[in-house]
Image (cartoon, coloured by chain):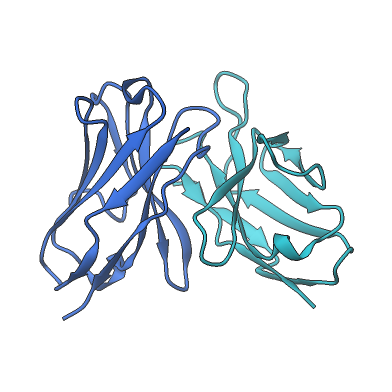
Chain colours: A cyan, B blue
């Protein structure tokens, strides 16, 4: 199975400052069709998970443009340009290139 | 409007069985593969299982293979997860979600399962 490793596991951030989360996979996530199925999910406290970004960098409908994704192959990054109070929660990367699909351990973003 | 509503969770003893349901509306169910994901306390989200749109293919996480079974009833627009031989480590909130690209786009609110004697 592909192992997804996120760093850091906790990220205290000052409001208005940037945050960055790294996600590394144990194997390349490039599918045979050429696409890379790396997704970022946000889970706010007490809420169901929410899709933020798919295929590395495509923001889902309604996701603010302060969220951006980048990377290729086995190394990926989620960036929040200016953290707002509503961004508090746990962020997960997940790969859907190879079965079984696998999540990272999650990164908790909190306000300093 | 897309809606997914899970049910069937509860407190169960180790070794017992449980069947979770996910009733959907607002989209053409039989066009979509579907999946289950769980939120395990202290551990985060774990992908559990996926079923193809026509029900002919199922995929499972290694940790649940042989004990969990995913199925669907397209006439009732409902997804199921049969969980057998429950273990304490199956304690989690279980979410259903759509599984066609852009995978994970819609989720239910979840149903909690607690395995305890």
Residue A101, x across and y down, in percent: 45, 42
Residue at the extreme left = B16
Residue at left 76%, top 44%?
A: A64
Residue at left 23%, top 42%?
A: B80
Residue A102, x across and y down, in percent: 48, 48
Residue B40, x across and y down, in percent: 41, 66
Note whether B68 is above or below A99 in the view shown: below
Q: Foreground residue, B24 or B103?
A: B24
Residue at the extreme front = B1
Quadrant assignment for the C terminus of chain A: bottom right
Q: Is residue A28 visible?
A: no
Note whether A29 is above or below B55 in the view shown: below
Q: Give left or right: position of B60 versus A36.
A: left
Residue at the extreme right = A17
Q: Foreground residue, B16 or A95?
A: B16
Residue at left 38%, top 55%?
A: B110
Q: How many marks?
A: 0
Residue A67, x across and y down, in percent: 77, 47
Q: Foreground residue, B66 or B109?
A: B109
Note whether B12 is above or below B3 in the view shown: below
Q: Is residue A44 visible?
A: yes
Residue at left 14%, top 73%?
A: B13
Q: Give left or right: position of B65 versus B37.
A: left
Q: Give left or right: position of A48 versus A75.
A: left
Q: Foreground residue, A67 or B2?
A: B2
């Amino acid at each position: 199975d592909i192992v997804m490793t996120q760093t850091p596991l906790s990220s205290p951030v000052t409001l208005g400052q940037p945050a960055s989360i790294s996600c590394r996979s144990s194997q390349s996530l490039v599918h045979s069709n050429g696409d890379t199925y790396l997704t970022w999910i946000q889970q706010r406290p007490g809420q169901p998970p929410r899709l933020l970004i798919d295929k590395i960098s495509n923001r889902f409908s309604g996701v603010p443009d302060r969220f951006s994704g980048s990377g290729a192959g086995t190394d990926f990054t989620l960036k929040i340009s200016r953290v707002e109070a509503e961004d508090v929660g746990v962020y997960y990367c997940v790969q859907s290139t190879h079965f079984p699909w696998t999540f990272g351990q999650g990164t908790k973003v909190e306000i300093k | 409007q897309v809606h997914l509503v899970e049910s069937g969770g509860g407190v169960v003893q180790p070794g017992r069985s449980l069947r979770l349901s996910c009733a959907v509306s607002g989209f053409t169910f039989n066009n979509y593969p579907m999946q289950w994901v769980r939120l395990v306390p202290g551990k985060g989200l774990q992908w559990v299982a996926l079923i193809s749109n026509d029900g002919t293919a199922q995929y499972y996480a290694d940790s649940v293979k042989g004990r969990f079974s995913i199925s669907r009833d397209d006439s009732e627009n409902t997804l199921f997860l049969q969980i057998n031989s429950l273990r304490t480590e199956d304690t989690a909130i279980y979410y259903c979600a759509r599984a066609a690209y852009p995978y994970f786009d819609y989720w239910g609110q979840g149903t909690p399962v607690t395995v305890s004697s």
